[in-house]
Amino acid sequence: MTDITNAPGPRSPHRTTELIAGTLKRRHAKEARLKWIGLGAIGIAFTMLFILIASLVSSGWQAFAQTHISVAVYIDPQEVPAENLPRGGFDDVLAAAMAQMLPDADTDDRATMRSLNGILSNGAQFSLRDQVVANPDLIGQTVTIKVPVSDPFDQLNKGLIDRDTIEQNRRVTDREIAWFDTLKDQGAISKPFNWALFTNADSRFPELAGLKGALVGSFWVLSICFIISFPLGIGSAIYLEEFAPKNKLSDFIEVNINNLAAVPSVVFGLLALAVFIGWFGMPRSAPIVGGLTLALMTMPTIIIATRAALKAVPPSIREAALGVGASKQQVVFHHVLPLAMPGILTGTIIGLAQALGETAPLLLIGMNAFITSAASSPFDSATALPTQIFIWADSPERGFVSRTSAAILVLLGFLMLMNAVAIYLRQKFQRKW
Amino acid sequence: MNDMRKVERDLKVNDAKITARNVDVRYGETHAIKDVSIDIPDRTVTSFIGPSGCGKSTFLRCLNRMNDTIDICRVTGKITIDGKDINERSVDPVQLRAQVGMVFQKPNPFPKSIYDNIAYGPRIHGLARSKTDMDEIVERALRRGAIWNEVKDRLHAPGTGLSGGQQQRLCIARAIATEPEVLLMDEPCSALDPIATAQVEELIDELRQDYSVVIVTHSMQQAARVSQKTAFFHLGDLVEFGETEKIFTNPSDPRTESYITGRIG
Ligand SMILES: Nc1ncnc2c1ncn2[C@@H]1O[C@H](COP(=O)(O)OP(=O)(O)OP(=O)(O)O)[C@@H](O)[C@H]1O
Ligand SMILES: [Mg+2]
């Protein structure tokens, strides 16, 4: 108990002041040092980040534009018979149109005609065909179409092919360069924003390859991951933190949840391969499997974040609620959970951001297949953003180099967006007590 | 404890509302309350006094089973309210705490609006039939808590934005909004100025007409002013319990005497 009368007095007040003054300089120096070390660390981190982004942007920015060519095509009824439209010789029609624009080309030489066609993307004849099939009246008329050029000419236009190297070591011949320059002088060449990067699915041809399949795949994977891991994670955390008796068993569970969070992701992939695909017979490469796998990985993160957030709610708030006669469940749902929400949401979004970038488990369940259409349900085959990056990084065509960087930039963009949302939610829901 | 059978003049009823028999409380190794037996009468203000750390809050918290929430806390002995053992399995602590309100030692408003702080208890117990009914309950509680005039223009501002003393009165208002039969107040005036203190004391006196009030206080004057019964705790023991007048004028235990004359404390 307090025992004022026996309390000792101060030792020597004046000396104390001197002593403090003596240590003050050292303490301030320490503080300044700490500050500089901190600033240095942040500086290094930012430099690294800057180098990363700068290198990605420098190699990837070109992929956000795509060289297009406008061609006036005469749909020759002899080549394209109305009765057998889909089998018509659209490539010949296109080659003829190209020859029209390049008068010095020898139209009788088949090799020349092939190289003329090679300027256009492989997809040009298909898009022309689709257009004519949709509107057969076009037969016998001249239509102007704007199509991507093939990858080597795209590279040439973007200045990524050195005209001074000897011809054999170049992917375009001197003749083709001359043609291209002629076309450019005619004003047929343009370089608009590459919307196809977002609206096309994967393709063998880099100028046609886009991220739509991967974006849709990642969307399904993340949705399933969220739908499963968020309620399960929060539910488990609330039970463990608020209701579970504190005993050996709950300690054991706690330790194992922490262990689970540290398990390498590739192990989850193997597990999914064995359990979801092997036992349950779920389809390979499907977002449903990817989502389930990533949910297993994300759940421990959410549980740990939620428990920490619940623990941070001051006990006085719980006492206040209990004191007016709230039941345990009311205390949790009316008071503790709302106060813990910012922490829970931040943890969840960080977990999801991790899941978005996760590659290894998706590779194991086959989400790196070559798939040329976007999944329309979580049961279709699909790729995800990170696995798409993996596929493109592995492709030999020059055009995929910049597309890989562009895909990484898109992935980073989404990660930054998610983190921004996390920060926004934290600020919005933050309350003082 | 020998004064228990005496009937005080200005009390109409003096049955024991709360009885405690041989109550021991341990926090792990710390023995905070040692074999305390006490009868707290109905329609009376009982004050608990004693030096800091002697177990006043601990004992108070036994009366609405608030110590259940502390893992290491073990309560033994028998406590009854209206003759019913509160630690029995059949007793729902939720019901008990609605019946026995509490004002905590540290003000702990909810991080919600002032209005919601008061309305929360009545809302979960379904005490209001309509919105206007609830408004009435809130206003009445805030008036009785002597804080209405200060907050009536900002009922929807956060309760945590009030000053310490205002928060304390908000918590008093919150506790009485559910109309408990017993009100436990742990140092309700520790952060209040003399005017607010006088208002709270008036409230306590008024509550005594219908309820049993237990108040922990460090102010002898306050204990003498508001309470009819006083219990003096020392190192976990209930040293002396009796008429306030007698405790302050003619204590039977030397420890009580030294405490009220300022020699221990
Ligand atoms: N949550 C707890 N955990 C462990 N020990 C506790 C806890 N609460 C109180 N104690 C101990 O129990 C004893 C009594 O504490 P209590 O809070 O009841 O004192 P008090 O009489 O209310 O003091 P004050 O007048 O300072 O509020 C003290 O020795 C204290 O250290
Ligand atoms: Mg206390």
Image (tube, rainbow, N blue to C red):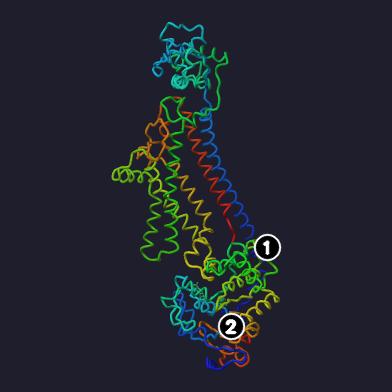
**Residue at point 49% right, 62% down?**
A332
Using the image, tell me which numbered label, if any, was put on residue B154.
1
Residue A78 in the image: x percent, y percent? 43, 10
Look at the image and tell me whether residue B257 can be seen.
Answer: no
What is the chain identity of the residue bearing mark 2?
Answer: B
Closest to the camera, between mark 2 and mark 1, is 1
- Decide: few, some or many residues near mark 1? Use Cα within 10 Å; few <14, some 14-19, many ≥20: few
Quarter of the image for the C terminus of chain A: give it: bottom right
Q: Residue furthest left?
A: A279
Left or right, A189 with respect to A382, comes to right
Determine if the C-beta at disc 2 is less than 8 A from ligand 1: no
Residue B3 in the image: x percent, y percent? 55, 93
What residue does disc 2 label?
Answer: B47
- Decide: few, some or many residues near mark 2? Use Cα within 10 Å; few <14, some 14-19, many ≥20: many
Name the image quarter holding residue B49.
Answer: bottom right
**Residue at point 59% right, 48% down?**
A36
Which is more toward the observer, B140 or A274?
B140
**Residue at point 61% right, 75% down?**
B188
What is the chain identity of the residue bearing mark 1?
Answer: B
> Given the image, on which type of amino acid does mark 1 rest?
Arg
